[in-house]
Image (spheres, rainbow, N blue to C red):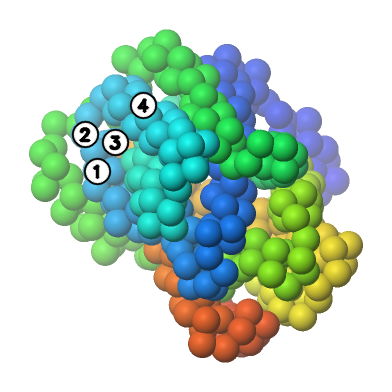
């Protein structure tokens, strides 16, 4: 076992030796940095425009609900059209809407409705991009490096979760969120350039001869007969419908219940990102010792404890520790579920299959955020988070009988 672990450690960064994967990884790092800066800016701006917990929760809903609505048709398109052209169009959409909401905010014309609308538009772009990017990864690296590639992508996301909020907090304090939104738009230029120069002519599933409707139904037909993908989706819904509450209320807790500023909010989200990065670096070795199902159970337990802490603790440093451990649990859950979904899919239906998985992820996150936001509006944030924990324990006990297979 020790020998196997040492080999895994040696190869954990192997995908970065592949030029196209490395270029896309770095460009994604830049664009994800802008995305996290935008999310912090949008969440904080909404608390400035309204203190209604439900309206604040709609920011998270607007980020992920488009994924539930559009990810499946986006996955179908990514399987039947040229992914390079498809991605360039979707990235252009993101640049345009990020710059527009930035300009509106700088000129002081933002309203809660406009902020939600443009956040939703950016969420649409993300929903269109994600299936194509997740399906692209197996084309860039050998199959025996897929786990490492997926983990590196997750690490990149969480490095930006650590750095983005810290940068955003400083910029918001100096100039307000408008500049943050503009920089988000600029951050997409790097990934646009890399994809523009990417030659995907040798991709085995670059295009399909199926029509849209035929491809859509064949994707659902595959899901119907794929027990493992169904299990991954069920476990995803059980985890993220509850885990979504962590980020839903954080800006309101910091501003209204702790009377703190954007730097404190950024510090807490950064703590979560640091925990996720550390978990991502350690996950390869962790998987060598423990089964996927046990890793997910660990994530559920730590997330439940974190939510209880977030419900009743209002001191910055204890909350930072809580967010740190919630980042660890979030990373473990996301990476484990994501890799399980990837490996359950053949090449011909990869983007559609990943879109079904991502739809369950986004849909449960959006629904959970809306429900906990409404409960908080009727009661208070502490009660809403406590209810989320109770619900999470029940639903995860019920779904634990469907076990993830090991990689």
For label 2, the crowd category at 10 Å Cα-Cα, with few meaning under 14, some 14 to 19 and many 20 or more, is many
Distance between the Cα atoms at labels 2 and 3?
Answer: 6 Å
Q: Residues within 10 Å of mark 3 (few under 14, many from 20)?
A: many
Mark 4 falls on what kind of element?
helix
Mark 1 in CB contact with mark 2 (< 8 angstroms): yes
Q: Tell me residue 171's x, y (percent).
A: 69, 37
Looking at the picture, how far across and down is residue 349, in whole percent? Answer: 30, 43
> Do we see residue 372 in this rendering?
yes
Q: Which of pointers 4 and 2 lies earlier in the amino acid sequence?
A: 2
Q: Are marks 2 and 3 in contact (CB under 8 Å)?
A: yes
Question: For mark 2, what is the residue?
Answer: 80
Residue drawn at x 44%, y 38% is 104
- Residue shown at the point (63%, 41%) measured from the top left: 176
The answer to whether 180 appears left or right of 170 in the picture is left
Q: Residue at x 11, y 39 (%)?
A: 211
As drawn, the label of residue 78 is: 3
CA–CA distance in space, label 3 to label 4:
16 Å
Residue behind mark 4: 92
Indicate left or right for 14 with 95 as reference. right
Callout 1–callout 4 Cβ contact below 8 Å:
no
Quadrant of res 179: top right
Is residue 292 shown to the viewer in this render? Answer: no
> Which of these two is toward me, 328 or 270?
270
Q: Report which residue position mark 1 lands on.
A: 76
Residue nearer the viewer, 372 or 97: 97
Rendering quarter of residue 303: bottom right
Q: CA distance from mark 3 to mark 1?
A: 5 Å
């Amino acid at each position: 076992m020790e020998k196997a672990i040492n080999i895994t450690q040696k190869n954990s960064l192997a995908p970065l030796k592949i030029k196209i994967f490395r270029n896309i990884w770095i460009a994604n790092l830049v664009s994800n940095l802008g995305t996290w800066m935008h999310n912090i800016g949008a969440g904080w701006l909404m608390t400035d425009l309204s203190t209604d917990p439900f309206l604040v929760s709609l920011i998270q809903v607007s980020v992920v609900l488009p994924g539930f609505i559009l990810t499946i048709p986006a996955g179908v398109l990514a399987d039947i059209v040229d992914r390079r052209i498809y991605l360039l169009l979707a990235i252009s959409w993101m640049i345009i809407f990020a710059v527009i909401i930035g300009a509106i905010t700088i000129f002081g014309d933002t309203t809660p409705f406009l902020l939600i609308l443009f956040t939703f538009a950016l969420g649409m772009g993300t929903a269109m991009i994600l299936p194509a990017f997740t399906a692209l990864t197996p084309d860039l690296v050998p199959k025996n490096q897929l786990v490492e590639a997926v983990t590196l992508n997750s690490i990149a996301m969480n490095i930006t979760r650590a750095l983005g909020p810290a940068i955003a907090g400083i910029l918001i304090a100096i100039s307000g969120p408008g500049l943050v939104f503009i920089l988000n738009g600029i951050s997409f230029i790097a990934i646009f350039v890399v994809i523009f120069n990417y030659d995907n002519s040798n991709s085995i599933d670059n295009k399909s001869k199926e029509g849209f409707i035929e491809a859509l139904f064949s994707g659902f037909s595959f899901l119907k007969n794929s027990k493992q993908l169904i299990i991954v989706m069920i476990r995803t819904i059980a985890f993220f419908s509850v885990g979504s509450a962590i980020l839903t209320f954080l800006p309101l807790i910091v501003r209204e219940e702790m009377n703190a500023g954007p730097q404190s909010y950024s510090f807490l989200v950064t703590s979560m990102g640091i925990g996720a990065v550390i978990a991502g670096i350690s996950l390869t070795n962790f998987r060598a010792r423990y089964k996927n199902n046990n890793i997910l159970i660990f994530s559920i337990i730590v997330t439940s404890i974190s939510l209880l802490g977030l419900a009743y603790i209002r001191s910055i440093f204890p909350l930072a520790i809580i967010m740190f451990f919630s980042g660890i649990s979030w990373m473990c859950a996301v990476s484990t579920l994501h890799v399980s979904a990837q490996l359950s899919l053949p090449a011909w239906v990869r983007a559609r299959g990943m879109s079904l998985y991502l739809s369950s992820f986004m849909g449960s996150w959006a629904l959970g955020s809306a429900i906990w936001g409404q409960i908080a509006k009727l009661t208070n944030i502490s009660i809403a988070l406590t209810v989320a924990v109770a619900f999470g324990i029940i639903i995860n006990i019920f779904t634990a009988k469907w076990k993830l297979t090991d990689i």
